[in-house]
Amino acid sequence: MADVAPSNKDVSAMPRILAVIKLTRLISVLAILSSLLGALIMFWIGTVNTFKVILLVGGLEEPFIESARLELTELATIELLECLDDFIVGLAFLYFAYGIYALFIQLGRPDPNLPSWLAVSNIGTLKKTLLEVLVVLLTVIFVKGLLERLSFQGLEWTYLVIPLSILAIAASTRLLQFDNEEEAAPPREAEE
């Protein structure tokens, strides 16, 4: 069987194909814009709900019908935790948008003007940070739900699913941290 050498036509087409493939990374702009829009929507919802709580505490708005048995302090706490949820989700969308921008548009080149907590050097860093945000979000949801359940009805054992989920995600995030530390750690010199 004779080896067939590639023709000049095949070799010259490869750089053009690679250039087209490299341009497909610009499709990530859709994810960036959608995430930014989602962040703005969540910040707007959180801000509107915060003003509703201010009006409620100021006596300018009637309490919600479903919360007739709650004291004003308990109701305000639950509603403000809901606002905190909205802002945390908005921040997660914002961080995701920046992470996709840094990885696919900037191609992972570090920006010296950014704080270290906003540096996204690889997809693993982005996933780890989003998992950490998810742990905080689930914790806020759990505390809010706990306050609501204690106010309206007794707790059930099935409500332990959320804290168990928080522990599982936190443990997996910790394992991801060990992987990143091993990658970043300089190799040890052999002991003599």
Image: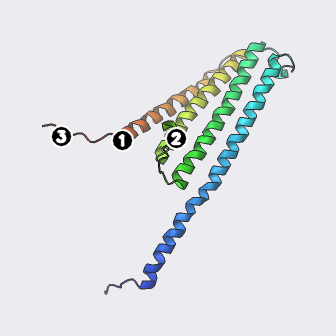
- Nearer the viewer's eye, disc 1 or disc 2? 2
Q: Secondary structure at mark 2?
A: loop
**Could you tell me how many numbered marks the image carries?**
3
Label 3: how many residues lie within 10 Å, few (<14), some (14-19) or many (20+)?
A: few
Instruction: Give the distance between the C-alpha atoms of the residues marked 1 and 2, in whole angstroms.
Output: 20 Å
Label 1: how many residues lie within 10 Å, few (<14), some (14-19) or many (20+)?
A: few
Which residue is depicted at the point 47% across and 73% down?
15
Residue 114 x, y percent position in the rendering: 52, 41
Identify the residue at the far bottom of this view: 2
**Residue topped by disc 1:** 184
Q: How is the image coloured?
A: rainbow
Of the two numbered discs 3 and 1 on the same chain, state the one appearing first in sequence. Answer: 1
Q: Secondary structure at mark 3?
A: loop
Residue 132 x, y percent position in the rendering: 53, 34
Quarter of the rendering containing residue 95: top right
Instruction: Give the distance between the C-alpha atoms of the residues marked 3 and 2, in whole angstroms.
Output: 37 Å
Which residue is depicted at the point 48% across and 37% down?
116
**Residue topped by disc 3:** 190
**Residue topped by disc 2:** 114
User: Relative to 191, is 31 on the left or the right?
Assistant: right
